[in-house]
Amino acid sequence: MTPEEIGARLAEVLGEAADVSPSAGGAFSRACATVPVGSWVEAVRTARDSLDLRFFDWLAGVDEGEAGFAVVVHLWSLPGRYGVLLRTVVPRDAPTLDTLTGVFPGASWPERETTEMFGITFAGHPNPGKLLLPDEFEGHPLRKDFVLAARVAKAWPGAKEPGESDTGAPSRRRARPPGVPDPNEWGPEKGQLPPEPARRERPARAARPRPGATPESGGE
């Protein structure tokens, strides 16, 4: 079946509450469905039973900013050799979602990882303990607002151009990547560093005369 045919069947079994569409990717595209948070478990169970999607492939989270956190699961049909992406979005201020472990026991570890990385709680999970991070670790590393504290102590690779040193004239100001704080605003050296140099404006380029133009012709 094509992604369009699978999507039509998925829309039929999930009902009007699901937003179904094929993804991009040409020959590797998948039928995708976004479902309400309250219908998450039932939608996954229905997709499994109605479309023979009995292979749990993976589950992951996505930080979508103010919209909240998306949870995406990919299911696969071994006999039919096609896959489906199911997605839901939990609010940022209360990221809670029912666990899929009752439908796919293999969702246990991916849900635990998603809890650590994004702070999403999977209600009813049989073993919600930490999986990857040490017990003393604070925060959720894959959130966009997570501060990369290590970059305060060690400059990120793009802080200097090749050949530049820590001495000499200040270089032009460069934008920091997301999560990298200003060491003068956050960290052990807060308020002790000189302000960063202002970004220098590039001079405007002079117009180049066209080949064959003369001063008398004004470039015409």
Image: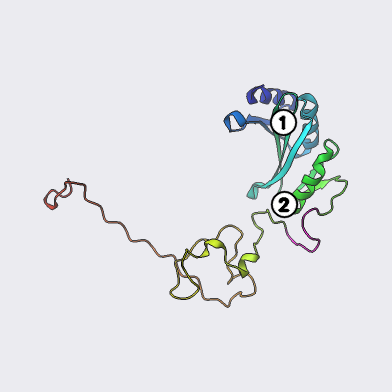
Other-residue count near label 1 (Cα within 10 Å), few / some / many at <14 / 14–19 / ≥20: few
Q: Which badge, 2 or 1, is on the more N-terminal residue?
A: 1
Residue occupying image coordinates x 21% and y 47%:
210
On the picture, is 151 further left or further right than 97?
left
Q: Position of residue 25 (x, y in %)?
A: 58, 33
Q: Which of 199 and 111 is in front in this view?
A: 111
Q: Which residue lies furthest to the front in this view?
A: 163
Residue occupied by mark 1: 17
Q: In this picture, which residue range is highlighted in magenta?
A: 131-139
Q: Residue 183 in magenta?
A: no
Residue occupying image coordinates x 70% and y 23%:
9
Instruction: Say which mark, if any, is on residue 106.
Output: none
Split into 4 quadrants, where in the image is the C terminus? Answer: top left
On the picture, is 67 further left or further right than 162?
right
Q: Where is residue 29 in the image (x, y as percent from the top left)?
A: 62, 31
Residue occupying image coordinates x 60% and y 65%:
181
Can residue 56 be seen from the camera position used here?
yes
Residue type at numbered disc 2 = Phe
Q: Which of 207 and 167 is in front in this view?
A: 167
Can residue 100 be seen from the camera position used here?
no
Q: Position of residue 48 (x, y in %)?
A: 78, 29
For mark 2, give the secondary structure.
Answer: helix
On the picture, is 9 further left or further right than 107?
left
Split into 4 quadrants, where in the image is the N terminus? Answer: top right
Q: Which of 81 and 119 is in front in this view?
A: 81
Residue type at numbered disc 1 = Ala
Residue occupied by mark 2: 118
